[in-house]
Structures are given as structure tokens and as C-alpha cells.
Image (tube, helix red, strand yellow):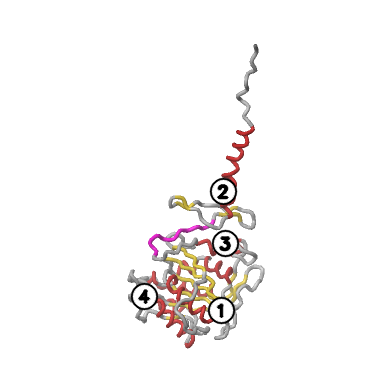
Amino acid sequence: MKFKKKDNKTPSRFLNLWAGISFFIPVFIIYAYSYYDQTLMIRGFEVKKLIRDKNNLFVKPVVLKSDKHDSTKLIIRATDSLKPIKTDSVEDLTVKKLDFEPQKKQWKNSNEIDINKPTDISDSVKQRILLIGDSESGGLCYPLNEYCEQNGHKLLLTLIWYSASVYNFAFSDTINKIILKYKPSYLFIVFGLNEMYAKDLEKRKKAADQFAKMIGGIPYLWIGPANFTKDYGINKVFESAAEAGCFFLTNNMVLPRGGDGRHPSSKGYRLWMDSIASWISISAKYKIAMEKPSKSKYPFKSRINTLNAARFRGY
């Protein structure tokens, strides 16, 4: 009796199918994650990803994690404000040259599109407001939101750049990108807390002048830091760089301190915002409606994006 020898070298259809599935599922997951707008964390480590830009080139996005020592519990990826969008997008700045003309004081790109033509400022105009700053912007955004809700303005975005200085704001293209994306009609700017003891004032003056040129053409209020110690001249540097009537000096105010002793408390931020709002209505070059909120709590609708200068300096 003859037995037919079994061919063990020929894999079954099931094994072929299983091998194919085992290969394609991880590939599909990786591909899908590259287009997913959230960040995957595994045991405290961030899974990096590559995305395609509109020129079909792979680029590595800047993805930062919030500082564990920051007082805020809200952790939002820094790239949330820099996701690719249509035509006048942040992404366009990587392929188009952005020019600034101080004489005309308006932004334009290489296609000669007037991206941010300033809106006429008056007490009756409802503004699209962008708040940018260091860690103090993270506390000031809440009372500012209440003023916006009360007066019909829209707080588009709060950018909190922890540990940042004037160098980060002046020499990074991050602010350019955000302005191009959100097209604000009014800017609130607050930083300087990390520069109380700075003595290289000439260099910082050049950076402050550069920053003032960057935001020229958009009505703004530049708010000096709520410092609890005497600075070495950084407030004067910022005030000299800003337009007349566009700088609010805070350092003479007495505000309740927070637990860390460096920042105002919640009550302090509200008192600070009350003073800012009053000053805007009376003394600011660009006056807008800032009636005091009639109730203490409004829904917070603004987006908050965070950066940390210790991990991403921007230039």
C-alpha cells in the first residue's frame, strides 16, 4: 500500500489570510493615526507621527506636552492651533513669503491678499479677540471671556506660552501663523513676568520693536506684567515699543497673589481685568466696549492652546 506524502511546505489559505491581516492591520492603524488630530500616549510617552502637507511631502509636526509643574490642569496640544486649514492657512507660510510693510501697516502674502485689514474701532463694533501671552494669560483669559460675553465680543483663542519672553514672541513665526488663521480684529497681549530681572534691555528693546512691527495694522492692547517685585526696566522697554495709548502699565497695581506668590489669585485676575477694561474705555488708543459683566459666570467658549518655551522656543 502506498501512502501519498503530505506536502508540509505549502501553507494553507487560512495561514496566508492571517499573515495578510497581521501585516495590513498595523499598517492601517499607523496610517489612520497620522491623520488623527489627537495624540496617543503610552505609559507617559508620546507616539510621534508624520503628516502630509499639501505638497504631498512628509513633515514632522511640532507636538509638545504641557509642563507637569504648570498650575493649569488643562493640557492641550500646541499644534491644535497650527493644524492645516484652507487657502489662508498656517501651512501656507511654509511655501509663501510673508512680507510686512510698516508704511501701510497691513499684512499681506505673496498673492497680494489683504488678510488682516483692521476693522474700524468703536464702542459699538463687536470684536474678534485673540489673547496671547505667557503664563499670566492663562489666568487673565477667564475674566476677559466674561467681558467678551457681556459686550458681544468673541474670544477666539488664548495662547499660553509658558516661560516665554519677548524673544519668543518677536522671533517666532508662531504668532504670524495664529494671526493668519484666526484673523482677529483686536489683540490682547500680556507677557514680561519672566523678564523682571532682565538687564540686557537694549537687545530686548530691539525684540520688542520687532514684535510691535509684527502686530502692526491690528488694533491691540499690550498689557505689562502683574509683577510683585520691582523690574529692571522691562516695562519701560515694552511701553516704548508700543504705540501711544496701547500699553497698560500694571506694576503699580496691588493685586492679591496666588499660591505660588508670582501670579495673581483668581480674585487678583478679576481685579486686574476690571482695571484694564476701565482703562480701555477711557484712555486706550483703540477703545472697544468693555462694560462690566452683569453676572459672575459665563460659559467659557474660547480655545486654549499651550506652548512651553523650555521645550519649544520658536526660533
- State the SS at label 2: helix
Residue reaching furthest to the top: 1
Residue 103 quadrant: bottom right
Comparing 242 with 224, the one in front is 224
On screen, 182 above or below 243?
A: above
Q: How many marks?
A: 4
Measuring 41% from the left and 66% from the top, which residue is drawn there? 72
Q: Looking at the picture, which amino acid does disc 4 mark? A: Asn
Is the stretch drawn in magenta largely helix, strand or loop? loop
- Residues at circles 3 and 1 in contact by the CB criterion of under 8 Å: no
Q: Which residues fall within the magenta stretch? A: 61-70
The mark lying in front, picked from 3 and 2, is 2
Q: Cα distance, mark 4 to mark 3?
A: 34 Å
- Of the numbered discs 3 and 1, the one sitting upstream in the chain is 3
Q: Which residue is mark 2?
A: 30
The mark lying in front, picked from 4 and 3, is 3
- State the SS at label 1: loop
Q: Which mark is residue 227?
A: 4
Q: Looking at the picture, which amino acid does disc 1 mark? A: Gln
On screen, 287 above or below 110?
A: below
Asked if residue 315 shows in the view, the reply is: no
